[in-house]
Image (cartoon, helix red, strand yellow):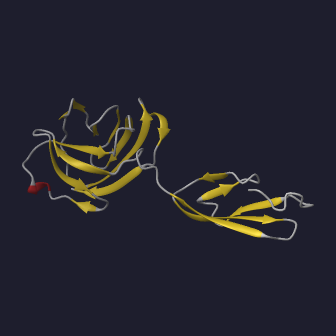
Amino acid sequence: AQLSPLNASDQQMIWTSDNTNIVMVDQKGMVHALAEGDATITVRTIDGNYTATASIEVLPNTTNRITGFTLVDSESDEDLLQLTDNSIVNIYDFPRVLYNIRANVPGEEVKSIEMRLSGPISRSWTEHQAPFALFGDQSGDYYGSDLPDGTYVISGIPFTGPEASGDQGSEKTITFTI
């Protein structure tokens, strides 16, 4: 920010954010995004108590993220359904097969995903290339597992580098019941 007039006797300014959970601002006016949401930055002069404001909207990282999870028939490699938070899956709607769960991502920025499943069966797995499948795959030919009845929690954390390295995206977690 530039103070006017340039020859003002006191050039000091105070910077504030009305929502420090979303953005912080230092005393040089540098804004640091912390989370998705809206905030207003205010600068106030010491001399004259003049103010100026700017509204800021912090958008989610749109490419280093998981958009959802898909239940996959590992024998046919076909998508069965999108798993959503608190969804109930009637496994009898599908032929008796082994299943896999794929983490879906937009674009090609994500290079690996740490995945965790807890429930009647548990698994932790870092998938290193698309498709990002909890039980793994060989060039898109999904491996599978039985999913016994019960409530599961699946979560994934995307990374821009191999082996869960590079920039970390936001964790995506859902609960579903078989």
- The residue nearer to you, when weighing 4 against 111, is 4
* Image quarter in which the C terminus is found: bottom left
| 54 left or right, relative to 12 | left
- The residue nearer to you, when weighing 158 against 99, is 158
| 56 left or right, relative to 65 | right
* Image quarter in which the N terminus is found: bottom right
Furthest-right residue in this view = 9
**Considering only vertical position in the picture, is 14 above or below 66?**
below
- Counting from the top left corner in percent of width and height, residue 14 is at 79, 61
- Counting from the top left corner in percent of width and height, residue 22 is at 58, 59
For the point 59% across and 53% down, the residue is: 33
| 178 left or right, relative to 25 | left
**Considering only vertical position in the picture, is 38 above or below 97?**
below
- The residue nearer to you, when weighing 104 against 50, is 50
| Corner quadrant of residue 93 | bottom left
- Counting from the top left corner in percent of width and height, residue 56 is at 58, 62
For the point 20% across and 49% down, the residue is: 148
- Counting from the top left corner in percent of width and height, residue 170 is at 45, 48
Label count reads 0
For the point 43% across and 49% down, the residue is: 171
**Considering only vertical position in the picture, is 40 above or below 117?**
below
